[in-house]
Image (cartoon, grey):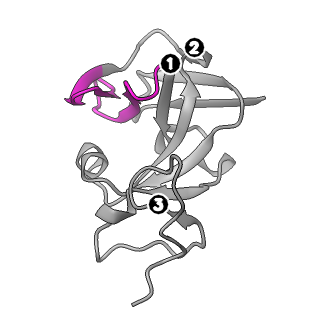
Amino acid sequence: MAVLTGRCLCGAVRYEYEGAPPEVFHCHCESCRRHTSSPITTFLVNVEAAALRFAATRPREFQSSPGVWRSFCADCGSPVTYRSERHPGMVDIYVGTLTDPAAVRPTGHVHSGEQLPWFETLDDLPRFHASRVDVEPIRYGPQRI
């Protein structure tokens, strides 16, 4: 059982997750880039929503596209979670909100087909063109130019 804690930048939103150790993926999609103002986003993926407990303040949610909701702190604006109708009862948590982000290790990259050409990570993890569900990676490791 993993016990992970986290918070937003200002500390108004605090959470605890207790459950199976989650997978961790880097996402290169445009929506995640826009939500975080960053070239890449890293998530704890498919965390059971029932195992995620918020302290007094819950993050605010907005629907970023049909069937997709992203949450953030209403005070400081920090992104906190992502959830989708495709995975009912599950939520993805932004790794940057963890109390100890070094306690988890990424296991792959998703939406590498949308990766910015000027940004690369030098790991040997599998890269998936879009989702990782029922498909083989397009490659392992960085682009070879």
Q: Is residue 68 magenta?
A: yes
Q: Is residue 86 left or right of residue 107?
A: left
Residue range of the region highlighted in magenta in the rendering: 61-89
* Disc 1 residue crowd, few under 14, some 14–19, many 20+, Cα 10 Å: some
State the image coordinates of residue 17 (x, y, percent, origin top left). 62, 24
Q: Taking 28 as reference, is 133 above or below it?
A: above
Mark with earlier residue (3, 2): 2
Amino acid type of the residue that numbered disc 2 sits on in the rendered structure: Ala
Q: Quadrant of the N terminus?
A: top right
State the image coordinates of residue 113 (x, y, percent, origin top left). 33, 64
Q: Which residue is mark 2?
A: 50
Mark 2 vs mark 1, CA separation in Å = 7 Å
State the image coordinates of residue 84 (x, y, percent, origin top left). 37, 28
Q: Describe the element under mark 1 as helix, strand or loop.
A: loop
State the image coordinates of residue 141 (x, y, percent, origin top left). 54, 75
Q: Describe the element under mark 2 as helix, strand or loop.
A: helix
Q: Which residue is mark 3?
A: 128
Residue at image coords 35%, 35%: 79
Q: Is residue 87 left or right of residue 35?
A: right
Q: Taking 140 as reference, is 97 above or below it?
A: above
Q: Mark number for residue 89?
A: 1
Amino acid type of the residue that numbered disc 1 sits on in the rendered structure: Gly
| Snapshot quadrant of residue 143 | bottom left
Amino acid type of the residue that numbered disc 3 sits on in the rendered structure: Phe
Question: Which is more toward the observer, 77 or 17?
Answer: 17
Q: Is residue 19 left or right of residue 41?
A: right
Mark with earlier residue (2, 1): 2
